[in-house]
Amino acid sequence: MKNKFTFAEAIKKAIIYSMKKDPKMISYGLGIDDPKGIFGTTTNLHKIFGERRVFDVPTSENALTGIAIGSSIAGSRVLFSHQRFDFSLLSFDQLINNAAKWNYMFGGKTKSPSITIRVVVGKGWGQGPTHSQNFQSLLAHIPGLKVVSPAFPEDAYNLLIDSIFDPNPVIFIEHRWLHGVSGGIKRNKISLGDVHLKQRGKNITILGNSIGLLNVIKVNRFLEKYKIYPEIIDCYSISPINLSKIVKSVKKTKRLLIVDNSNTFCSFSSGVLAELVQMKKINFKSNPVIIGNKNIPSPTSHYISKFFYQDSLSIFKRILKTFGISNYEIPTELKKNKYYHDVPIEKFGPF
């Protein structure tokens, strides 16, 4: 039987596994060695591996990403952690113009930087426009970068290990709300680029990843009452992505709903849908649907934020609408929480 660990513990175990496997590997980031250890994912790692391999850094994201690229080219595997995805913005020059293009610019004669960048997506009261953004679609657009976003502890554990040992730069996206989710862990190699058939179904295909996938699974058990049996696919690899499994599923169900964890305009989800439509192999029974966050900056207000994010209730309603069902009852478990609609646990605050 697999032992149960939280998502945060799975991340920590993956780092320990990787650093033991590669004695040259280094890991650094702002707050990596403080008592909270980046939401509990790095606590005491500096004591296990020493301060020369696990260390705190100044707030110089672009320079530190350049150091990661140079260190990797020189032979050190690097894991660089950001406590918020937003904090990585200053490093996009290094990520896009150096890390992603290195192998291409030198005709394949030099290896791509083997670096993994951990980024945490925030959500909840006080996060606001500059502490809650998800740039998954932007970075998935860049050739040479791999982008992954797991939903479950076991996938987080395996994907982080496989990202660290992948010979390309990888962006590893963690949603803050997932850190407390628990599940079993077993070491299985995952191909970066693959998707996972989470549940077989017959009359609608639902794609999702990260927090969005958990919202889908929360809805799933209320659909049988309406004779809706979804095929659920975990798109934990955003770029590259295995479209063949998705095409096979949608050709069978002839309906599609994609749950996105960011704005939907020019998004990962719209890109996947565009690829499917261009194939002209699918006779949809209803128009494909994308559901995600509103195309505005995330509000800071506790009250307004309840209308910004996609959630289980909005997914439930949209699935029923796809089947033309208008007479339904909203399950109590899906109703918005008046007080804690935007926090994973009650004690979660502005950071």
Image (cartoon, rainbow, N blue to C red):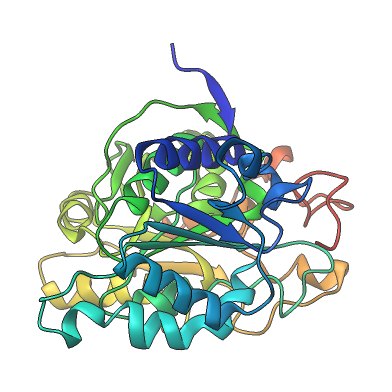
Residue that appears at 87% across and 53% down: 338
Left or right relative to 248: residue 70: right
Q: Nearer the viewer, residue 6 or 289?
A: 6
Give the camera-side residue of 191 and 15. Answer: 15
The one nearer the camera, 35 or 194, is 35
In the displayed structure image, the side of residue 279 where residue 220 appears, left or right: right
Residue 323 at x, y = what percent? 42, 55
Toward which corner of the image does residue 231 lie, by quadrant? top left
> Where does residue 248 sit, x and y in percent of width and height?
15, 52
Q: How many marks?
A: 0
Q: Is residue 87 visible?
A: yes
The residue sitting at 73% across, 69% down in the picture is 307
Left or right of residue 246, residue 119 in this image = right
- Residue 15 is left or right of residue 28, and the answer is left
Res. 326 visible in picture: no
Q: Is residue 34 above or below residue 269?
A: above
Question: Of residues 317 and 87, which is closer to you in this image?
Answer: 87
x 68%, y 46%: residue: 330
Position in image of residue 321 (x %, y %):
49, 60
In the picture, the quarter occupied by the N terminus is top left
Residue 87 coordinates in the image, percent (x, y): 63, 75
Viewport quadrant of the C terminus: bottom right
Q: Is residue 83 above or below residue 11?
A: below
